Amino acid sequence: MDELFFHASNIRNLTEILPLSKHHNSGEKVAYFTPLRAYALFYLRDMEINHVTCGVNEDGIAVYHEQFHNQLETLYQGRSGYLYICENKNMELAHINGVWTASQPVTASRIEYVADVLVEILEAEKSGAVQIVRYDTLLDEKKQEFVDMMKLVILNQGYLTSNSKKSLFFKHNFPESWKAAEKEKERIYTVS
């Protein structure tokens, strides 16, 4: 029997997983999969916000990095979705550890409903399948790196002048970065 892979989706009752996402390197249309159920849980997300901050380490453990206080709860508490279980049919290892792609439709052999993603993630943490690096445990230097990085994201993505759900997400959860971006934008306009 082929190895089983997981595909996360907010959509119910799919029979096939279609290649609808862009491949990060080539731009080719692909579908993404992982053999790690715990890693797939993080992709049961709000697609409008789409703030996923995890990866898979060399030991095959999903590692989640919070970038603001209570990020995990903010993004996943009360969220539900579906994990589609598929056999490895013509999947290729992607450029990211723990991620596989398929450029052709893949048949789902089973579906699993996840009622509360946060509960499942915390269970996976207890079992050792997930490691969570919580924001409150970070050194001040690392927190400042996030402030600076998110300021650039806010500026580069035009969130200051947008009323999108993602813009409001950044404004609410990265207030220091938001204020720094406003100051930077004001400084640029003043100098110009």
Image (cartoon, rainbow, N blue to C red):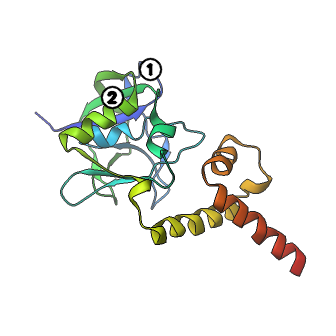
Q: In x, y percent, where is residue 46?
A: 54, 36
Q: Name the residue type under label 1.
A: Arg
Residue under label 2: 84
Asked whether 186 or 24 is in front, the reply is 186
Which quadrant does the C terminus fall into? bottom right
Q: Name the residue type under label 2.
A: Tyr
Labels 1 and 2 touching (C-beta < 8 A) = no
Q: Is residue 101 above or below residue 2?
A: below
User: Viewed as shown, does residue 113 lie left or right of 72?
Assistant: left
Label 2 packing within 10 angstroms: few (<14), some (14-19), many (20+)? many
Corner quadrant of residue 41: top left
Check the image and name the residue furthest to the left: 1
Label 1 element class: loop
Q: Residue at x 33, y 58 (%)?
A: 96
User: Viewed as shown, does residue 107 lie left or right of 52?
Assistant: left
Say if residue 88 shows up in the picture.
no
Q: In x, y percent, where is residue 128?
A: 19, 44
Asked whether 29 or 113 is in front, the reply is 113
Q: Is residue 121 above or below residue 181?
A: above
Dot placed on the residue nearer the N-terminal end, 1 or 2 = 1
Q: Is residue 78 above or below residue 145?
A: above
Corner quadrant of residue 158: bottom right
Asked whether 55 or 101 is in front, the reply is 55
Q: In x, y percent, where is residue 165?
A: 67, 40
Q: Residue at x 77, y 63 (%)?
A: 182
Q: Which mark is residue 12?
A: 1
Q: In x, y percent, where is residue 110?
A: 27, 22
Q: Which mark is residue 163?
A: none
